[in-house]
Structure formats: C-alpha cells, structure tokens
C-alpha cells in the first residue's frame, strides 16, 4: 500500500526520548533441548530495529518463550548468535545482562512481602542506585502507568490483577532498559481490561520508544501491538516477518493465511485510517453538517465500511479535525485498498 504505513512505524523512526533503545538481532539461532528430537527453535533470523515492537506470534509450543529466554540467557542457544546493540549476548555476564533487559511475564511474580514501591526498586538497587534515586524512580513509574502515588505503599495482594500487571510493566521499565521482553504479559487478564492495558501500553511506548519483543498466541493482539510481526510455527520455524499490513495483505503461505483468519481483509481495513487514503468528491461534500455520529478522519476504513453497511449506502462523508467535510469514503475506495496489497508482494523472509 502507498502512504498507509501504520502511524506507529513512522513514529518509531523518531529519536528515542530519554534513554536509549538498542537493536536486537537473531542470527541463525537454533535451540535443541537435551533429549528432544526436534529443535525448539530452528535457524531463526530476524532483526528488530531500535525502538520498534516486534511481536512473536504462533501456536502453543512453537518456541516463543524459548526465543525470549535465549535473549536474556535464562537458557543458552545451541547454534547461531543473538546480538543486542551489535554485541553478542554470549559475551555478556548473564546476571548483568538480565538487569539490563526488562522482562515481563504473565505471572508477573511481584514479591508479596514487598510494597509496590519496594518491588519497583529491586533492580535499581541491585544496579547500585542509592535509596533516594530508587524511590524517586518508583514515584515516576507509578505516574507513568497512571496509578496514584498512594498505591506504592500497598502490597501486591491489595491490587487488582490488571493493576498488578501494570506494576509488572513498570517494574521492568525501572532501570530504563534498552530492551524489553514481554511474554504473553496480558494473557491472564479479562478481555476488557486487556484492551485497556494494550492501549495504555501503546501510549507509553509512543513516548518511551523501547525496543520490545512481545510474545502472544493471539493474532489480533499481534496486529494491534506490533510494528513488525514474526509468525512462527511448530519446530520454531519463522514463516513470515513483516509489518501487520503486509502480512494481512500477502500471507506467505496457507499456514499464515489460516493463522491470520478468513477476515484478514477486515483486519487490514481496521489498520488504515481514513486520513491515510484519498477520499472522493472533496468539493461536493461541502454542504454536509457534522454530528456526534459523523465519521472522522481518525476513524479506520473498517469504521467507514461499517457505517456504509448500517446506512445501506455506498458512500459516507468524512470530517476532518476542524469539523470540515474532508470528502467521501466509498465502496470503491475500500475495494481499491484491499486489491492494492495483493500485488505489492514483498519478500517476506528476513534478509
Ligand atoms: P511457546 O512459548 O511457543 O508455547 P516454548 O518455547 O515454551 O513454546 O516451547 C517450545 C518447545 O520446546 C515445546 O515443544 C516444549 O515442549 C519444548 N520445551 C520447552 N522448554 C523445555 C525444556 N526445559 N526442556 C525440554 N523441552 C522444552
Ligand atoms: Mg510460552
């Protein structure tokens, strides 16, 4: 598609605000567990540019957690190499490496006998920060994740599941790591709260611009969260690595097509904002009046299609940020966008 890069990937090129983010590269990585016939990870290669979110997605057992644990050396690889900031993780002291990498898991493992502030200060203190600096950082982190300062004095059992998960994210951010590993971080949260956590996380990431490897088995979560998606299948094989839009437009094979679902066209429409396409009949839309229900340019093409279906119409007027008519979204525009992707087939395998 032309000029319809998701906003997130454009923003990812902006200079990181505050601390650094480092690129991460998997270079021909394999992992065979002792006594297992098939490798858990097989010749995995891909690069995550600094400040981008890469989502590893695939069915249970395809090696997602293994790939994460190879990065922070909770387990060691059998073949290949992993480079963080162009430096092999194999040359690093595992303990030091782990303190430099934020790690968020589903059972976040907050220490029950420490307060929330205490939990967030653990890694900074291990890194030698004095108490005053660690305390100030805890306060800053609570504010960052939108929890009142008072909650810092509570114990984990006195928070809801969603709040604890946010603290888990904050704690991983405490020492301002150049890389975050997030293994199904919102997997145990109910759908409504998961949606909120995802949105909050995306807002946070738009400011922090960390390099993030995010694991999920849920393709919709992958599409929502990822600048890039790596689709894995059983045996730890990388099937496709590309932007969500490119994967939805051009699944590399039947496995990916099935995995992303029959409604991939609709999913793609949800990724594209009305502001990103050329609307029709700009001039003749001048007389339309905006109401609360009106389509706005920040809505998606999917919202536009949905409105046309509800109204049994073939075009709907769209209003810009100043409340002025920007033109019409039409069935033709939607069909053209869906057709477009099928031709600009890119090489989906990593270089
Ligand atoms: P995912 O996170 O995608 O569900 P995992 O990385 O946990 O997958 O597991 C990948 C494969 O490696 C699975 O077949 C699993 O059974 C196997 N595996 C994981 N951990 C170990 C281990 N410690 N010893 C042996 N096999 C393991
Ligand atoms: Mg796993």
Image: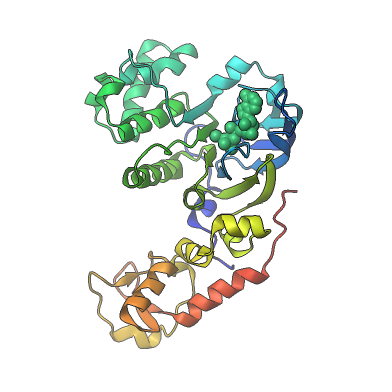
The picture places residue 203, in percent across and down from the top left corner, at 39, 45
Viewer-side residue, 38 vs 313: 38
Compare residues 187 and 315 and report the one nearer the observer: 187
Which quadrant does ligand 1 occupy? top right
User: From what the image shows, is residue 193 above or below residue 346?
Assistant: above
Q: Is residue 128 visible?
A: no
Is the N terminus in the top left, top right, bottom left or bottom right quadrant?
bottom right
- Number of callouts in the render? 0
The colour scheme is rainbow
Furthest residue in direction bottom, as rendered: 284
Q: Residue at x 49, y 78 (%)?
A: 333
Q: Quadrant of residue 245?
A: bottom right
Q: Residue at x 44, y 13 (%)?
A: 125
In the rendered image, the vertical position of residue 21 relative to residue 15, given as above or below: above
Drawn side of residue 338 relative to residue 238, left or right: left
- Left/right of residue 259 with respect to residue 324 in the rendered view: right
Which residue is at a point 45% across and 63% down the rendered structure image?
270
Residue 203 in sight? yes
In the rendered image, which quarter is residue 166 located in?
top left
- Residue 253: image location, x then y, percent: 68, 59
Measured as percent of width and height from the top left, residue 102 is found at: 50, 28
Task: Determine the residue positioned at 57% across, 44% down.
Answer: 59
Please name whichever residue, 107 or 150, is drawn nearer the observer in this view of the structure: 107
Residue 314 location, x and y as percent? 40, 84
In the displayed structure, would residue 312 be above or below residue 172?
Answer: below
């Amino acid at each position: 598609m032309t000029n319809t890069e998701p906003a997130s990937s454009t923003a990812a090129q902006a200079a990181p605000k505050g601390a650094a983010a480092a690129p991460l590269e998997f270079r021909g990585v394999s992992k065979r567990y002792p006594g297992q016939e098939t490798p858990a990870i097989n010749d995995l290669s891909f690069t995550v540019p600094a400040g981008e979110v890469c989502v590893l997605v695939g069915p249970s057992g395809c090696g997602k957690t293994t790939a994460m644990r190879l990065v922070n050396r909770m387990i060691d690889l059998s073949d290949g190499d992993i480079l963080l900031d162009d430096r092999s993780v194999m040359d690093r002291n595992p303990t030091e490496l782990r303190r430099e990498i934020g790690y968020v898991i589903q059972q976040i493992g907050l220490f029950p006998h420490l307060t929330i502030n205490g939990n967030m200060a653990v890694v900074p203190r291990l890194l030698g920060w004095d108490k005053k600096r660690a305390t100030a950082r805890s306060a800053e982190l609570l504010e960052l994740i939108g929890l009142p300062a008072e909650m810092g004095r509570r114990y984990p059992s006195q928070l809801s599941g969603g709040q604890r998960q946010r603290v888990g994210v904050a704690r991983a951010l405490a020492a301002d790591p150049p890389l975050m590993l997030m293994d199904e971080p919102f997997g145990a949260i109910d759908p409504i709260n998961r949606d909120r956590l995802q949105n909050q996380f995306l807002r946070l990431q738009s400011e922090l611009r960390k390099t993030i490897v995010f694991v999920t088995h849920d393709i919709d979560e992958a599409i929502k969260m990822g600048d890039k998606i790596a689709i894995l299948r059983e045996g730890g094989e990388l099937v496709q690595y590309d932007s969500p839009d490119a994967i939805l437009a051009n699944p590399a094979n039947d496995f990916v097509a099935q995995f992303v679902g029959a409604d991939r066209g609709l999913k793609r429409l949800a990724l594209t904002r009305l502001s990103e396409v050329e609307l029709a009949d700009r001039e003749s839309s001048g007389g339309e009046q905006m109401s609360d229900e009106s389509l706005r340019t920040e809505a998606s093409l999917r919202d536009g299609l949905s409105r046309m279906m509800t109204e049994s119409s073939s075009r709907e007027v769209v209003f810009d940020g100043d409340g002025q008519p920007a033109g019409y979204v039409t069935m033709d525009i939607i069909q053209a966008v869906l057709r477009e992707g099928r031709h600009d087939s890119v090489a989906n395998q990593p270089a």
